[in-house]
Image: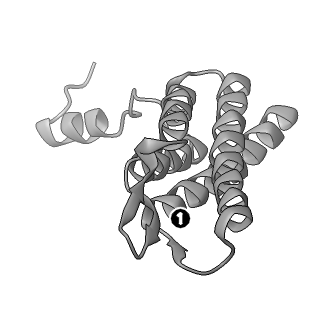
Amino acid sequence: MARQSASTRTASSTAKADPRPRVDPSRKQLGLAVLMVLFGSFMPWIDTAIGAISGSQGPGLWTFYAAMFGLAGALVPWRRVAALQASVLALVAVGLTSWQVIHLINLVGFGGWVPGPGLVLVVGGGILAGVVAVRMWRAVDVA
């Protein structure tokens, strides 16, 4: 048996495969959607002449709960469960922000208020979660 030199041993030991599994890009995007909804839930949703109205005074709490549900979807190892949780996050985030805007339009019309950064972040995170959910469902069908 031939002896290996020190340089041969280190080269072969560094060529080993990384034991950690590769993180699915969809899960990273779902994590980004969760962060967007999480931070947007507590930021101002509506800016008026009187002042800003925070999302935590109304439906922002529900979007926060949905973000926690979506976070669990980003962490579970099962793709179907993650896709279901991402779709629930998308439905809640987009649904509640749409309801909030429609409700305001019915109350005061288009004058005197503008959407705040929290509302925009939550709807953006909801749309991203919906895209991720569709991508995960398609990957489940392929596998």
Q: Is residue 16 left or right of residue 109?
A: left
Residue 103 at x, y percent in the picture: 70, 56
In what element is the residue under mark 1?
helix
Considering depth in this image, is 45 or 38 the residue closer to the camera? 45
Residue 57 visible in the current orientation: yes
* Quarter occupied by the N terminus: top left
Residue 134 in the figure: left or right of residue 34: right
Classify 91 as above or below 78: below
Residue 45's place in the image compared with 76, above or below, is below
Query: Residue at coordinates 51% horizontally, 36% vertically from top-left?
Result: 67
**Who's the residue at 49% across and 27% down the image?**
75
From the viewer's side, name the closer residue of 142 and 27. 27
Tell me the quarter of the image containing the C terminus. Answer: top right
Residue lying farthest to the left in this orientation: 6
Q: Position of residue 62 (x, y in %)?
A: 54, 34
Q: Position of residue 10 (x, y in %)?
A: 19, 37
Q: Nearer the viewer, residue 4 or 39?
A: 39
Relative to residue 104, is residue 67 depicted above or below? above
Label 1: how many Cα within 10 Å (few below 14, some 14–19, many 20+): many
Counting from the top left corner in percent of width and height, residue 89 is at 63, 38
Q: Quadrant of residue 77?
A: top right
Which residue bears the numbered disc 1? 120
